[in-house]
Image: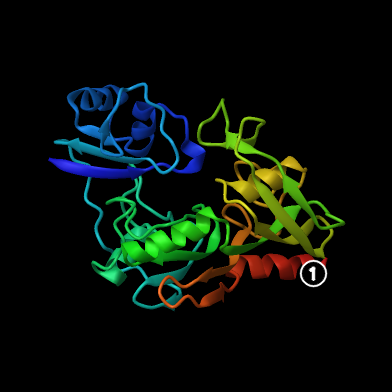
């Protein structure tokens, strides 16, 4: 019997349990998950539920099944390490790397890399698919990410994330010219027409993005974004909502041609600051800009 431990993020709240599980474990059909629920082999917070149950933030879902999803294996993939000790690892994630395995994509993720680097020293709170992972950034977003090596560290960092006390700043090249700095305070939720996309919607969760103009160019603006909340695709959705989508964004962008190949959104998690889970010391780290973004800026400066 194989066990899968799943956690519910805020943006996935109110999904039916059978739909939520098949979104996470897509190798299993919805009807199969319903049978598991009816047999008592799926619990939420150690309690039996009905297939109509709607998941809540922080729910802990345990799925027991004889069917097998491929094991996640360590891979010797180089990591750009910004900081490391016995509790945490902070890495500068490259563009194109998925943070954790998902159905159909069980190899070459950040989790595969940190499993090799950390051996067995990773928190298990988020289950076998996401060991050590306490927060995420998109596949084509680069920059700083915290990995937790034990459950105590994971709980401490997760608590700071929930209280929005972790300092997170991003650098983004957006389309068009923004004259003044500002704040976008618009609720974000999942799109009713495409569940893989997020959108500004009255029924969404409150989302606040503060942006500061760093430099204007002819067709683009380099901005620094500070997240007050941490919704899925928050910066990308918010900047698109005010008519300045992130350059190179295939999902929310406007197709503006860029001077370099961005391979997705020109967005970089530049700075992260947090209180260390053991020492109580405040740590602030910056991730060097990726080569393509440096080149993007230089080419814009020449125009």
Name the image quarter holding residue 81. bottom left
Which residue is disc 1 drawn over? 301
Q: Report the quarter where the C terminus lies.
A: bottom right
The answer to whether one can see residue 30 in this image is yes
Count of numbered labels shown in the rendering: 1
Give x and y (percent) for residue 51.
32, 22
Q: Residue furthest right?
A: 179
Q: Position of residue 58 (x, y in %)?
A: 41, 44
Picture residue at 44% right of the left edge, 29% below the top: 15
Q: Bin the neighbour count of mark 1 within 10 Å (Cα to Cα): few under 14, some 14-19, many 20 and up.
A: few
| Residue 1 percent coordinates (x, y) | 12, 40
Q: Is residue 137 visible?
A: no
Left/right placement of residue 28 relative to residue 185 reads left
- The front one of 40 and 253 is 40
Image location (x, y in percent) of residue 13: 47, 35
| Element at label 1 | helix
Height in image: 156 above or below 235?
Answer: below
Q: Residue at x 55, y 55 (%)?
A: 163
- Which color scheme does this rendered protein use? rainbow
Q: Is residue 111 left or right of residue 299?
A: left
Classify residue 83 as left or right of residue 116.
right
Q: Residue at x 22, y 46 (%)?
A: 70
Res 20 quadrant in image = top left
> At 28% from the left edge and 21% from the top edge, which residue is drawn?
31
Question: Please, is residue 300 above or below residue 83 in the view?
Answer: above
């Amino acid at each position: 019997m194989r066990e899968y431990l799943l956690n519910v993020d805020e943006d996935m709240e109110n999904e039916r349990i059978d739909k939520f599980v098949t979104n996470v474990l897509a190798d299993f059909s919805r009807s199969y998950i319903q049978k598991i629920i009816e047999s008592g082999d799926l619990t939420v917070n150690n309690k039996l539920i009905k297939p109509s149950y709607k998941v809540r933030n922080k729910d802990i879902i345990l799925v027991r099944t004889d069917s097998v999803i491929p094991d996640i294996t360590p891979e010797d993939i180089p990591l750009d390490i910004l900081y490391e000790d016995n509790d945490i690892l902070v890495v500068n994630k490259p563009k194109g790397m998925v943070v954790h395995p998902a159905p159909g994509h069980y190899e070459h993720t950040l989790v595969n890399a940190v499993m090799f680097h950390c051996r067995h020293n990773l928190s298990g709170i988020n289950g076998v698919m996401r060991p050590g992972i306490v927060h995420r950034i998109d596949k084509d977003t680069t920059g700083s990410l915290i990995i937790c090596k034990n459950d105590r560290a994971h709980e401490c960092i997760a608590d700071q994330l929930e209280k929005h006390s972790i300092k997170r700043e991003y650098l983004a090249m957006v389309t068009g010219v923004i004259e003044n700095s500002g704040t976008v305070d618009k609720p974000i939720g999942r799109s009713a027409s495409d569940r893989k996309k997020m959108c500004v919607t009255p029924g969404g969760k409150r989302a606040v993005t503060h942006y500061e103009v760093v430099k204007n160019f002819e067709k683009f603006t380099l901005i620094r974004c500070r997240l007050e909340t941490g919704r899925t695709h928050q910066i990308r959705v918010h900047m698109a909502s005010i008519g300045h989508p992130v350059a190179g964004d295939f999902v929310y962008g406007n197709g503006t041609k860029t001077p370099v190949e961005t391979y997705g959104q020109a967005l970089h998690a530049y700075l992260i600051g947090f209180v260390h889970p053991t020492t109580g010391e405040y740590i602030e780290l910056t991730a060097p800009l990726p080569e393509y973004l440096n080149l993007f800026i230089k080419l814009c400066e020449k125009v």
